[in-house]
Image (tube, grey):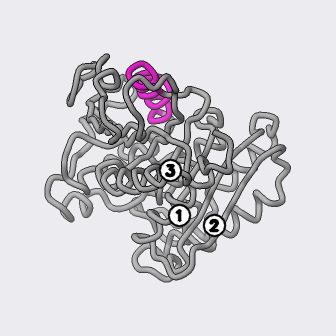
């Protein structure tokens, strides 16, 4: 079931009459995840009657990130010669509170092998209005079901109601969202054509929220190694990946080994035999976990859709 807001289903684009981007919000109830998702969409800067279709960037953690991402996307496209136009789609939950998805994201963005993100009860008490999974829904490792929601429900919805280009679907995710992006790259590679990965969850050292001990556990590497063994399925990859220089020094997240894990993974990717791929990776100086992702987004979008890149 889909609930439309901010305009009728077929008229969102046809009614667009100005040079400013149209922004709309929608609720999609998933049969793969026991969840209603809030989907925020920003169209590119263009005018009514423009016959073109546009690439799409799908971003996770929409409750927290959409307002920032839409502002930066507008600035990048308004420059004219900076990037090709694109549609921004943010995946979030039915709330206006930025941290409302703190518990639900643990389920949707984690995957088998990923340590328990944070203590659920502690997270629920940290901010008022945090949403919980419906009864019987798993608390962690719901990444495969979330992939199915994106592929079979969200993408068809976007392609039906907006002038999207099905051949160019980019992904942006930070932290656990970055880890989900890598998990998807290695397990469902063709879901996206371009991967923008910010500070991904790759390695963990210490006891996680479920009491499991991890000893410098580079839990993402087995997925990368398996993908390398079937490398014919990963060809023509376009990926930008980054991390903040100061993230390994931060409490309480230092257990996640963001920088050292990033080095392990990029070292492996450089040595692996993935054919015909364009992979850019960098450690962004002087940035922390909470400050690096807007920079990563801008640099990644330029890498994907810059005027000197393919449209």
First to last magenta residue range = 145-163
Q: Is residue 157 magenta?
A: yes
User: Which residue lies at the image location 46% right of the left edge and 63% below the top edge?
Assistant: 293
Name the residue nearer the viewer: 174 or 223: 174
Q: Are marks 2 and 1 in contact (CB under 8 Å)?
A: yes
**Residue 134 position within the rendered picture, expressed as x and y whole percent measured from the top left:** 25, 36
Q: Residues within 10 Å of mark 2 (few under 14, many from 20)?
A: many
Question: For the stretch drawn in magenta, what is the main secondary structure?
Answer: helix
Residue at 45% x, 76% y is: 288
Earlier along the polypeptide chain: callout 2 or callout 3?
3
Q: Answer above or below: position of 168 versus 153.
A: below
Q: What number of labels is visible?
A: 3
Residue 27 in percent (x, y) is at 26, 30
Above or below for 216 versus 179: below
Where in the figure is residue 33, as x and y percent of width and height? 37, 31
- Give SS at disc 2: helix
> Label 3 neighbourhood size at 10 Å, few (<14), some (14-19), many (20+)?
few
Asked if residue 54 shows in the view, the reply is yes
The residue labelled by disc 3 is 80
Q: Is the N terminus in the top left, top right, bottom left or bottom right quadrant? A: top left
Structural distance between the alpha carbons of marks 2 and 1: 8 Å
Secondary structure beneath label 1: loop
Crowding at dot 1, Cα within 10 Å, few <14 / some 14-19 / many 20+, comes out as many
User: Nearer the viewer's eye, disc 1 or disc 3?
Assistant: 3
Q: CA distance from mark 2 to mark 3?
A: 34 Å
Q: Which residue is mark 1?
A: 199
Residue 102 appears in the rendering: no
């Amino acid at each position: 079931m889909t609930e439309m807001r901010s305009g009728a289903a077929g008229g969102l684009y046809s009614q667009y009459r100005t040079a400013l981007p149209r922004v709309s919000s929608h609720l999609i109830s998933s049969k793969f995840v026991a969840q209603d998702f809030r989907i925020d969409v920003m169209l590119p800067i263009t005018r009514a009657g423009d016959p073109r279709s546009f690439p799409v960037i799908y971003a996770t953690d929409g409750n927290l990130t959409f307002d920032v991402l839409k502002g930066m996307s507008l600035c990048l496209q308004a420059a004219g010669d900076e990037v090709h136009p694109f549609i921004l789609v943010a995946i979030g939950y039915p709330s206006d509170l930025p941290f409302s998805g703190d518990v639900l994201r643990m389920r949707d963005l984690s995957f088998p092998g990923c340590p328990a993100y944070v203590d659920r009860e502690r997270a629920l008490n940290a901010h008022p209005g945090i949403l919980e999974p419906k009864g019987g829904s798993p608390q962690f490792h719901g990444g495969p079901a979330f992939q199915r929601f994106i592929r079979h429900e969200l993408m068809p919805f976007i392609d039906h109601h907006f002038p999207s280009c099905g051949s160019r679907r980019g992904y942006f995710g930070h932290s656990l969202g970055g880890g989900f992006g890598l998990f998807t790259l290695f397990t469902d590679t063709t879901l996206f054509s371009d991967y923008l990965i910010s500070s991904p969850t790759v390695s963990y050292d210490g006891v996680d929220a479920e009491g499991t001990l991890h000893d410098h556990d580079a839990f993402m590497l087995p997925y990368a190694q398996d993908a390398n063994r079937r490398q014919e399925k990963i060809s023509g990859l376009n990926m930008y990946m980054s991390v903040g220089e100061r993230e390994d020094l931060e409490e309480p997240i230092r257990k996640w080994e963001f920088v050292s894990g990033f080095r392990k993974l990029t070292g492996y990717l450089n040595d692996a035999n993935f054919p015909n791929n364009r992979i850019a990776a960098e450690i962004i100086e002087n940035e922390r976990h909470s400050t690096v992702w807007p920079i990563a987004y801008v640099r990644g979008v330029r890498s994907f859709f810059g005027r000197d890149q393919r449209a």
